[in-house]
Amino acid sequence: MFGVPGDYVLGFYELLGKRGMRIVNTCDEQGAGFAADAYARMRGLGVVCVTYCVGGLKIANTTAEAFAEKSPVVVISGSPGMRERDKNPLLHHKVRDFDTQFKIFEQITVASTVLQDVQTAQKEIDRVLEAALRFKRPVYIEIPRDMVGAPCIAHHRTADVRKVSDGDALKEALEEAVAMLNAARQPVILADVEIHRFGLQETLLRLAERANIPIASTILGKSVVGEEHPLYLGVYEGAMGREEVRQYVEESDCVLLLGVFMTDVNLGIYTARLEMARAIYATSEKLTIRFHTFEDVMLEDFLGGLVEETLMRHEPGAYPHPAPAVEFVAQGKRKVTVGRLFQCLNAFLTKEMVVIADVGDALFGAADLLIRHRTEFLGPAYYTSMGFAVPASIGAQLADARLRPLVLVGDGAFQMTGMELATAVRFGLSPIVVVLNNRGYGTERQMQEGSYNDILNWNYHRLPEVLGAGRGFLVETEEQLEQALNAAQRETGGFCLLDVCLDPMDRSPALERLTERLGKRI
Ligand SMILES: Cc1ncc(C[n+]2csc(CCOP(=O)(O)OP(=O)(O)O)c2C)c(N)n1
Ligand SMILES: [Mg+2]
């Protein structure tokens, strides 16, 4: 559980500590929120626990991200006791009414509750947690501080509320989908975030391998399969992605869209051309096959069902693959460019790493990294809140201690939440943090220049002195980059930070394509 305590939640913290819950207190609540989100993305549920309003409202943003990108985070907040609320006193942290925070969280969670009644508390907890697990979205539980020790009502039993598919609808949907797939000349799968969230990576792979159908992923769904798999095409994102992937997907006569969010980023700022007349579109919320809509068919039942059907084995002929990682030969004193940085990182990556990209060119450039193992890439590629990556690395490494986080973060985003490296130190974690230091808001500079895109240039590589731990590297040339990454690989005991100096106007090819389009719109 991640969080920052306060007097309204201290009693609850004490109880949790006594019960052996591991509490990771962060520098700032937003750090705890992002860490819990990353933990949830990797382990299926994460918890952030904060105090009333001053803490709670700081994680409105991280909870919004978890909602938008479907991450089941349980938000627990303390609040003033029920008996303290008589005559509406002005208690510290209160904003407007006692339920102001609750009303805000109602908007950004899929279920919410205030545990104010011992008669209903246990049922309420079950209802809310069940919603988090079913919908893969955040939920909110508020505990007035005088309810923490309240006795439970006995004989409580958890209701079994598992939703099942309508058998007839499922059968008909499968028949239609199989007919369409078997008749297709060039079927293709486009897989996204819900495949991660619903744990369907293995089923997806079985389907693709049985019918021999190539798979592309969206940027939000990146690493849905290990990217060295022979059936993997690369990231599809309309005109923003690699041209050969765009062509292959858009020329397909049957696109199987699995758990895809039709967001502007996923669709390359709506440059994607995906016609529903050629699509089977299955998500946890809806299923359409061409223009037929099916009610009450669960994504896992549909996908699981498809694997069991008699599927024709396709002969896809030639199709694109991601560029393989090639050995990086450092060009001595040559200044590091964004393009060369990502080439170098590609060669450096192993399957014992989880790549976490922050918003900015870190995320755009990361699209072309070859992720060796599935679900080893995390990036806020829809909600795109800066400041995700450093705190997310804490959640990710605690979720899976075998993985070392490789954090890619812009200097702007780093200045928002980079102090959470202190938390990484306290909990013995060892992220490799690559700061893409282009002296400001590079992504925005590309669209519209102004002094508001400038930020102070920190001596990022000297943060280990401030924190009394970790190692820092100033990287200006290719040989320094190579040396720093090699040293970081050996230095497994703590964090390593690479301050990679880049030209303010340099950019990845994907960013170049994106800003061209957004610039026009602005
Ligand atoms: C919390 C938040 N504030 C503002 C923005 C708008 N925004 C998008 S990209 C960007 C600049 C990011 O700068 P940096 O982290 O240095 O990455 P770079 O663009 O330079 O690669 C900004 C301000 C945002 N996405 N999130
Ligand atoms: Mg920057």
Image: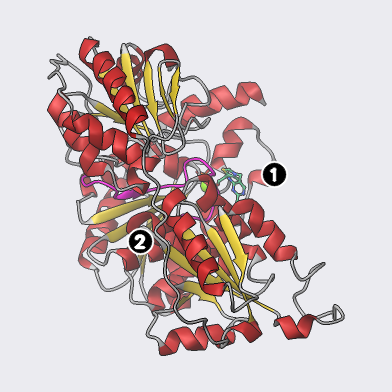
Residue 76, position as x, y percentages in the image:
55, 70
Q: Main secondary structure of the magenta part?
A: loop
When asked about the image quadrant of residue 95, the answer is: bottom right
Please give left or right for residue 353 compared with residue 235 in the image. Answer: left
Q: In this view, does 3 lie above or below 362?
A: below
Q: What element carries label 1?
A: helix
Looking at this view, is 440 or 195 the one in front? 195
Q: How far apart are marks 2 and 1 (CA)?
A: 35 Å
Residue 186 seen: yes
Q: In this view, does 29 lie above or below 211?
A: below
Q: How crowded is mark 1: few (under 14 residues within 10 Å), some or many (20 or more)?
A: few
Measuring 85% from the left and 77% from the top, which residue is drawn there? 88
Looking at this view, is 411 or 520 the one in front? 520
Measuring 24% from the left and 37% from the top, which residue is drawn there? 304
Q: Residues within 10 Å of mark 2 (few under 14, many from 20)?
A: many
Residue that extends furthest to the front in the rendered view of this protein? 155
Measuring 60% from the left and 55% from the top, which residue is drawn there? 61
Q: Is mark 2 on a helix, strand or loop?
A: helix
Residue 377 among magenta residues: yes
Q: Which span is picked out in magenta?
A: 371-391
Residue 237, position as x, y percentages in the image:
41, 27
Q: Which residue was labeled with disc 1?
A: 451
Indicate the amino acid at tag 1.
Ser
Looking at this view, is 208 or 131 the one in front? 131
Q: Which residue was labeled with disc 2?
A: 396
